[in-house]
Image (spheres, rainbow, N blue to C red):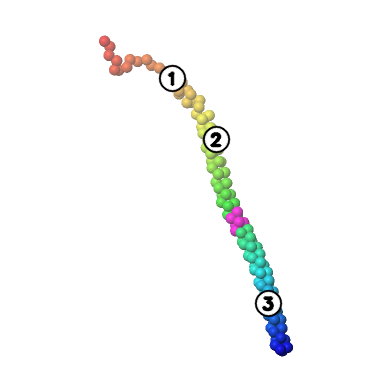
Amino acid sequence: MTSQSQGIQQLLQAEKRAKDKLEEAKKRKGKRLRQAKEEAIAEIDHYRLQREKEFRNKQTNVMGSQGNLSAKIEEQTKETVRNLTSSYHKNMESMMKKLLSTIYDINPEVHPNFRHA
């Protein structure tokens, strides 16, 4: 009977050791899962930052070229306005003379369709 109770004691101790090892393995597994999750989050953050940086660079390049384009258009517009203004000042005097001569030089005539009764 003592040998049986010793055998039972040994089985209980073996079961306890197995249970302890199992709990320790579960803790290690949980710890490793948390660590893997943290590593994944760090990797995702790194990737996101990298992609955002690339996006900002592309956006800057595109917006920079648009900025250059708008600057060119603005300069062309200013040049056109300058040309029109200079043309106006250059031709204003002669046009005023032509306009005034047309207004002041009136030759009164009888209209050809007028019938004298």
- The residue pinned by badge 1 equals 103
Three-letter code, disc 2: Arg
Q: Secondary structure at mark 3?
A: helix
Q: Is residue 50 visible?
A: no
Tell me the CA gap for discs 3 and 1. Answer: 117 Å
Residue at the image position 66 percent from the left and 66 percent from the top: 34
What residue occupies the far top of the structure in this picture? 117
The stretch of residues the image draws in magenta is: 50-56
Using the rendered view, name the quadrant where residue 44 is placed: bottom right
Q: Is residue 58 above or below residue 114?
A: below
Tell me the CA gap for discs 3 and 2. Answer: 92 Å
Residue at the image position 71 percent from the left and 89 percent from the top: 1
Q: Is residue 34 above or below residue 101?
A: below
- The residue pinned by badge 2 equals 82
Q: Is residue 101 left or right of residue 48?
A: left
The reply to whether the magenta stretch includes residue 93 is no
Three-letter code, disc 1: Ile
Q: Is residue 105 left or right of residue 80?
A: left
Counting the numbered discs, the total is 3
Q: Choose mark 3 or mark 2, whichever is in front.
A: 3
Q: Residue 70 at x, y = what percent?
A: 55, 44
Q: Residue 86 at x, y = what percent?
A: 53, 32
- Among numbered discs 3 and 1, the one appearing first in the sequence: 3
Q: Is residue 16 visible?
A: yes
Could you say which is closer to the camera, residue 87 or residue 14?
14
Q: Residue 94 at x, y = what percent?
A: 48, 26
- The residue pinned by badge 3 equals 19
Tell me whether circle 3 and circle 2 mark residues in contact (CB < 8 Å).
Answer: no
